[in-house]
Image (cartoon, rainbow, N blue to C red):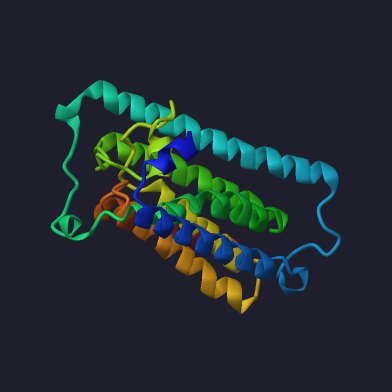
Amino acid sequence: MGYALAQKLPGSRLRRERGIFSASLEVWRCLVNAFDNRESLVRVPPAGLPAPRLGERLTLLTALVSLYLICYWVVTRLTAAAGPDALFDTRSSLDPLIPYVPATWPLYWLAYPFVVFGGGAAALRLPGPAFHRAVGALAAMTVTGAVIQLLLPARAPWPADPAAMQRYLHASALMMPYATLPSMHVAYCTVAAGLMTRVTRRRAVRVIVPIIVAAVAISTLTLREHVVLDATTGLALGLLTVAWWRRGIG
């Protein structure tokens, strides 16, 4: 299916998308290499995690993913059932100034490995109290985001002719053009960045992760997945979550 869609793209557009995709992979490779240095980690038990405790942590992280999917499903279905008259117009004067750039879809998809593998690996390396507080913070952020999305329902400004991979994402049974304010895409990336910079002293990580968060946030706008208000509120929600988490761990 992806090949068939790619065949329909103009050559220049396909080359741009491939170029950005390659650049995204290179950034991710550099991040993994910089992050995977145990000597640079701070506040990590030297003996590592015992197997049962690791299993418990993985279970909690899986539960967080399930919580997000449940919240997303509930919000999108309730919003769709409420009808178009219930939707708020969250667009601002800045949104028409932002061009649609289909080639930025790799940056949008970069959020998934960044949060799951980068943020997940950082969480697993946290001491017990810090880990459990991080799980609580993420759960609270997920529910808070869902409540706001229910109180301020809006429709995503999806483009009529999206990029190939963007079209593939929109075609999935789970996806609907709702649950936009705040952008949880941006919020989760912000928290993942906060976790990753907490467990390493490596300068490369501290430089790269904010750039990735910014790139993801920009891609949500250039792909018309969100409007400016969605991205900024998602960033604010993520920063508040990181601040609350760090306050409790010193």
Question: In x, y percent, where is residue 248?
Answer: 57, 60
Quadrant of the rendered image containing residue 237 = bottom left
Viewer-side residue, 31 vs 74: 31
Q: Position of residue 79 (x, y in %)?
A: 28, 28
Toward which corner of the image does residue 158 lie, by quadrant? top left
Residue 25 position in % (x across, y down) = 56, 60
63 vs 113: above or below: above
Outermost bottom residue: 203
Q: Residue sitting at 25 percent across and 37 percent down? A: 155
Q: Is residue 237 visible?
A: no
Q: Would residue 54 appear left or right of 167 to someone viewing this image?
A: right
Residue sitting nearer the eye, 98 or 186: 98
In the rendered view, tell whether residue 180 sits above or below residue 205. above
Left or right of 89, for residue 67 = right
The image quadrant that residue 76 belongs to is top left
Residue 181 is left or right of residue 142, and the answer is left
The quadrant the C terminus occupies is bottom right
Q: Is residue 37 above or below residue 128?
A: below
The residue at the point 65 percent across, 40 percent down is: 60
Q: Give the side of residue 201 with respect to residue 243, left or right.
A: right
- At 32% from the left and 24% from the top, the residue drawn is 78
